[in-house]
Image: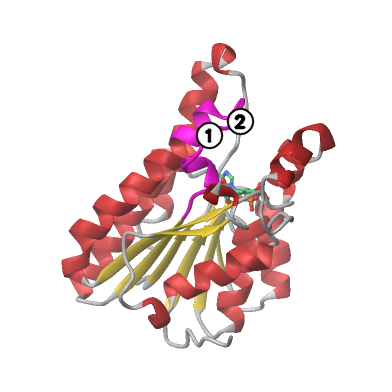
Amino acid sequence: MERSFAGRRALVTGAGKGIGRDTAKALFASGARVVAVSRTQEDLVSLAQECPGIETLCVDLGDWEATERALSTIGPVDLLVNNAGVALLQPFLEVTKEACDRSFDVNFRSVVQVSQIVSRGLIARGAPGAIVNVSSQASQCALKDHAIYCSTKGAMDMLTKVMALELGPHKIRVNTVNPTVVMTAMGRANWSDAQKSEPMLSRIPLGKFAEVEDVVNGILFLLSDQSAMTTGSALLVDGGYLVG
Ligand SMILES: NC(=O)c1ccc[n+]([C@@H]2O[C@H](COP(=O)([O-])OP(=O)(O)OC[C@H]3O[C@@H](n4cnc5c(N)ncnc54)[C@H](O)[C@@H]3O)[C@@H](O)[C@H]2O)c1
């Protein structure tokens, strides 16, 4: 389904690889002006080569001050995709302070910060906006070794609802997409072991993991006017995993 984002400016975090990269490319191909944010300069350079004219911003979103500086002159943004995330898996009894802090800094705190910056700009301009937070099926079910990851995404889901409540009157919609496993760099790092992935796969009614494109389609739907009456919701892209 074609959607035009002509005349809109979109900011995508974690746009160097995986879901974020393909989201940035899809928005760019659909006519949006795109600001691609990532912490790895070489990924942004190759993205800019693929999409001439795309804007790039290299910053570690886990660093509040650096992010504040990097986004201080960001200019008008209509559409925001909070996609950057880390999955630091540890058994609960071995969870470290470092993993806990890093996970919440990147997966949760940066979402608060970047969304505030973008929302304040939208409100000042009186412009409508849409924000999509890339959550996970893991926000809604317990997964072994995922105590911190599940918790950051659970917090993201609730943050999304409160943001929807408070930003709705300003014509800003806020939703999540909640994918199952996707074999990106992150997915491969955590799910390549068949002993681990087979039990997960066997519980997915559609019998497969998600493709990056499945998630991108969900994000674009939630950014577009086709979902104009949808806010505060979670779009499951999980092949039915959470049904059972
Ligand atoms: N892959 C999966 O199985 C899966 C499933 C459900 C949800 N998700 C979520 O989707 C999102 C994207 O995941 P992915 O699979 O594409 O991951 P990925 O590791 O392939 O890509 C993540 C991107 O985010 C960037 N990033 C990470 N930390 C950053 C930071 N501190 N500052 C700036 N950029 C940073 C990385 O540089 C990279 O470009 C994440 O939020 C993840 O939690 C992934």
How far apart in space, not on screen, are marks 2 and 1 (Cα)? 7 Å
Rendering coords of residue 244 (x, y %): 56, 46
Is disc 1's CB within 8 Å of ligand 1?
yes
In the rendered structure, which amino acid carries the disc numbered 2? Leu
The numbered dot on residue 88 is: 2
Judge from the rendering whether residue 150 lies leftward or rightward of residue 130; answer left or right.
Answer: right
Task: Kindly report which numbered mark, 2 or 1, lies closer to the viewer in this rendering.
Answer: 1
Quadrant in the picture for residue 50 = bottom right
Rendering coords of residue 37 (x, y %): 54, 57
Say whether marks 2 and 1 touch (CB < 8 Å).
Answer: yes
In the rendered structure, which amino acid carries the disc numbered 1? Tyr
What residue appears at the point 34 percent right and 55 percent down from the top-left corner? 115
Rendering coords of residue 17 (x, y %): 68, 56
Rendering coords of residue 41 (x, y %): 66, 53
Tell me the residue that label 1 is attached to.
149
SS class, disc 1: helix
Q: What stretch of residues is rendered in magenta?
A: 134-151
Is disc 2's CB within 8 Å of ligand 1?
no
What residue appears at the point 61 percent right and 30 percent down from the top-left corner? 88
Whether residue 65 can be seen here: no
Q: In this view, does 83 lie above or below 123?
A: above
Q: Name which of mark 2 and mark 1 comes first in the sequence.
A: 2
SS class, disc 2: loop
Residue 143 counted in the magenta span: yes
> How crowded is the residue under tag 1: few (<14 C-alpha within 10 Å), some, or many (20+)?
many
Q: In this view, does 211 lie above or below 157?
A: below
Residue 222 counted in the magenta span: no
What residue appears at the point 59 percent right and 63 percent down from the top-left corner? 215
Q: In this view, does 52 lie above or below 170?
A: below
Judge from the rendering whether residue 100 lies leftward or rightward of residue 120; answer left or right.
Answer: right
